Image (cartoon, rainbow, N blue to C red):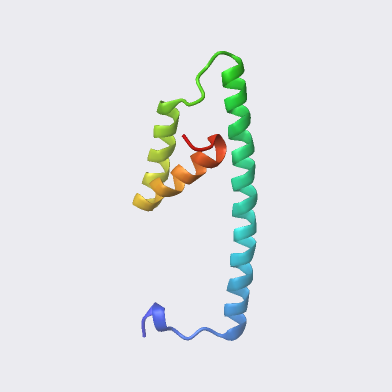
């Protein structure tokens, strides 16, 4: 029997779904907080004469996500970056 078709007790399935819901809530909270922090960084940078974007910083973030999550990480990082700075 493979993991894909292994039988799971109904209570375990319920517990796993509860955990997923909790994780989703935490991911959303972190996503929103990261966007707030990123927007504030941009405001401070621009108020001090800097540019709206720092491409080296964005490239480093993209690479961090790619290394941790593979090719899908790049797509996730793009969404995370956009949430904090808005569309280009």
Residue at 58 percent across and 72 percent down: it is 16
| Image x and y of residue 78, in percent | 44, 43
Image quarter (top left, top right, bottom left or bottom right) of the N terminus: bottom left
Q: Residue at x 51, y 24 (%)?
A: 52
Residue 67 % position (x, y): 37, 45
Judge left or right: residue 63 versus residue 83.
left
Specify the farthest residue to the top.
49
Which one is in front, 74 or 26? 74
Image point (51%, 43%), residue name: 80
Residue at x 47%, y 86% (from the top left corner):
7
Name the image quarter holding residue 18.
bottom right
Q: Is 31 drawn above or below residue 6 in the view shown? A: above
Q: Quadrant of residue 45?
A: top right
Question: Considering only vertical position in the picture, is 46 above or below 82?
Answer: above
Q: Position of residue 3 (x, y in %)?
A: 40, 78
Q: Nearer the viewer, residue 29 or 6?
A: 29
Up/down of 25 relative to 86, above or below? below
Outermost residue on the left side: it is: 71
Residue 23, image x and y in percent? Answer: 60, 60
Query: Is 23 placed left or right of 72 in the picture?
Result: right
């Amino acid at each position: 029997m493979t993991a894909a078709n292994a039988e799971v007790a109904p209570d375990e399935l319920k517990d796993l779904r509860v955990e997923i819901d909790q994780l989703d809530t935490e991911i959303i909270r972190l996503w929103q907080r990261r966007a707030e922090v990123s927007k504030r960084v941009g405001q401070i940078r621009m108020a001090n004469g800097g540019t709206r974007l720092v491409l080296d910083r964005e490239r480093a973030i993209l690479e961090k996500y790619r290394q941790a999550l593979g090719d899908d990480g790049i797509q996730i990082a793009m969404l995370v970056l956009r949430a904090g700075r808005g569309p280009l």
